[in-house]
Image (cartoon, rainbow, N blue to C red):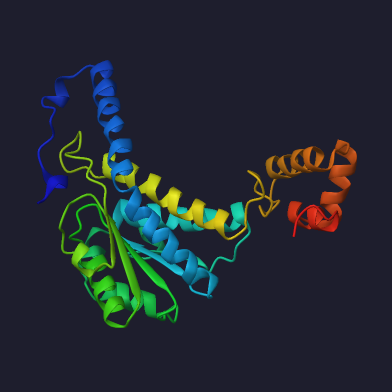
Amino acid sequence: MNITESSSEFDNLDRMSTKELLNGLNQENQKVQSAVAKVLPRIEELVQICFEKLKQGGRIFYIGAGTSGRLGVLDASELPPTFGISRDIVIGIIAGGDRALRHAIEAAEDNPEQAWKDLQKWNISSQDTVIGLSASGKTPYVIGGLHHARREGIFTACITSNPHSPLSQESHVVIEAIVGPEFVSGSTRLKSGTALKLILNMISTSLMIKLGRVWGNQMVDMKITNSKLKHRGIRILMKQLNISRTNAEQLLHKHGSVRSVLKNQKKIQ
């Protein structure tokens, strides 16, 4: 069933006022949360499996094309500065390579062999997990990548917005967030993309918490790379250690990270 290519439930968009367009888009966006809620058990299953594999030294690979690929790369790229993990733990791969992040390279998604070639550059093994991202569930690049990975004994999963798709057939865990037809027919950068962003946030954030990268509700492993993060780190230390701003700043400068300070002060392991 190709829901993502179905005609919009709204017509004559080109005749709508700005208010009507925004109300329609907002009305459609409200359906996303419900669709994600329905697949929480599958998301939980995937998180548990990924957690066990990460603890054993495995990695997570997101593979996708277009909007889906960009969202995968975005999620993976935000984890090192936020949680202090290495950049080779969660890896986003997009059809067409890094250039496709800014420029549409639509034909890149049609090669069913390229994703496996891209994965092999990382010396992928059965310790790892490959998560295919495709709103339609029909993207050859993604299907081919999961097919080869599964054949090689690698655990696979997918996130899609169509039920019973070819991509699902190549996945051990299937997450189908059925958000319905898009406001602009076929434009999966809308609800499908929003659902994917939410699900990726849930997967990666819960994994980082389970791996000990959060203490209480604070990002104690964030990399202090700018003024905003420095001041955030200072505030965390002031609160946790009940010390002055000056002392917190000095400790952060000395030890380099919030975790290192707290560990030195015997507040965290």
Whether 81 is drawn above or below 118: the answer is: above
Q: Residue at x 28, y 77 (%)?
A: 150
Whether 116 is drawn above or below 43: the answer is: below
Across and down, in percent, residue 256 comes to 79, 56
Residue 238 location, quadrant = top right
Q: Is residue 265 left or right of residue 146?
A: right
Q: Residue at x 16, y 59 (%)?
A: 165
Whether 177 is drawn above or below 77: the answer is: above
> 76 or 131: nearer the eye?
131
Quadrant assignment for the C terminus: bottom right
Across and down, in percent, residue 231 comes to 74, 39
Across and down, in percent, residue 162 comes to 18, 51
Residue 28 location, quadrant = top left
Q: Residue at x 44, y 49 (%)?
A: 202
How many marks overall? 0
Q: Residue at x 57, y 53 (%)?
A: 209
Residue 69 location, quadrant = bottom left
Q: Tell me if I can see residue 128 in this picture.
A: yes
Q: Is residue 121 left or right of residue 3?
A: right
Across and down, in percent, residue 73 comes to 43, 57
Q: Tell me if I can see residue 189 in this picture.
A: no
